[in-house]
Amino acid sequence: MTVLVTGCRGRVGSTLLTLLYGKGIPVRAASSSPAHFAPPPGVDTVRCDLGAPETFRAALDGVDSVFLYADARHIDAFVTEARAAGVRHIVLLSSSAVLSPDAAANPVAAPHLAAERALAAASADGAFDVTCLQPGAFATNALQWAPAVRATGAVDLPYPDAVGDPLHEADLADVAYAALTDDRLRGSSLVLTGPEALTFAEQVRVLARAAGRGISVGRVTPEEWKASVEAYLPAEFADALLAYWRASAAAPVPLTRTVEEVTGRPARTFARWAADHAEAFRG
């Protein structure tokens, strides 16, 4: 089995790459900018830009399985090339947002849903098996607070009481590894969460303890927060996030035990994630 890992410069992709390599599974590291990635010795790198379909054929040549980030821009072309290359299994990094009733109209969920549907159609035709990983909140989202914490010791949030289910990237990589190597998981959809529901304010307190410093939480209006991110976050995405945070502050976040059921051990806590990344929050 040769596995193509897309997005290998990302935290999930790079962790999965290390897991596969460490188990002696032939793996190919794919990135839109492979020159900026240093893989383990002996691991080939290849350019696979999910926004550039002309890169798909060479990247998929000789590949049996793929770990694929959800990018709907050229998913049909990817399916065509994967079919031609003889790929037998694709593990898609999707999102639990696809389970929302308004997923098709939600700018955050819609690309993941479109990718899932395109792969499901190919799977129904017998092209290859598809396993969907549907995580909720990534613990690494907290890293967006790090620059402000280092500079000011404070985090300004529109909804400090918004609740998330932060999932450690190592747990996601462990589940992806299991999905790629355990035939019993083929064709399933796995909804993944961290082991606990925490408000943003609670997450900040956990980070403060891990970093050994004070971090205060300020409240800003949704309009002020949206203006602060407009340089890099499209307005429709900002609006979708604000709506989600507002709703999550008023309703419980359902948790799953999928990580434990798949890996045989409890999911890592946010405190563990904070300890692993504490240096990012120290000024």
Image (cartoon, grey):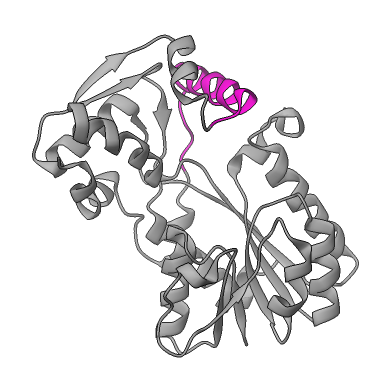
- The answer to whether 149 is drawn above or below residue 51 in the figure is above
Identify which residue, 258 or 8, lies in the foreground: 8
On whether residue 240 falls in the magenta region, the answer is: yes
**Viewer can see residue 182:** no
Q: Is residue 216 left or right of residue 257?
A: left
Query: Residue placed at 62% from the left, 51% from the top?
Result: 94
Percent x, y of residue 251: 48, 20
Pick the quarter of the image with the C terminus. top left
Rendered position, 262 above or below 212: below
Report the residue at 49% width, 18% height from top.
226
Pick the quarter of the image with the N terminus: bottom right
Q: Residue at x 76, y 50 (%)?
A: 73
Q: Is residue 273 left or right of residue 6?
A: left
Q: Judge from the rendering whether residue 156 lies leftward or rightward of residue 18; answer left or right.
A: left
Above or below residue 14? Residue 276 is: above
Residue 34 belongs to magenta span: no
Q: Is residue 263 above or below residue 111?
A: below
Residue farthest to the right, as pictured: 125
Q: Which of these two is toward me, 51 or 159?
A: 51
At 72% from the left edge and 38% from the top edge, which residue is drawn? 110
The total of numbered circles placed on residues is 0
x then y, percent, for residue 50? 69, 59
How far across and how far down the image is residue 266, in percent? Answer: 34, 57
Q: Which residues are magenta?
A: 233-255
- Prevailing secondary structure class for the magenta stretch in the rendered image: helix
Q: Residue furthest left?
A: 212
Task: List x then y, in percent, for residue 92.
Answer: 64, 60
Q: Is residue 62 visible?
A: yes
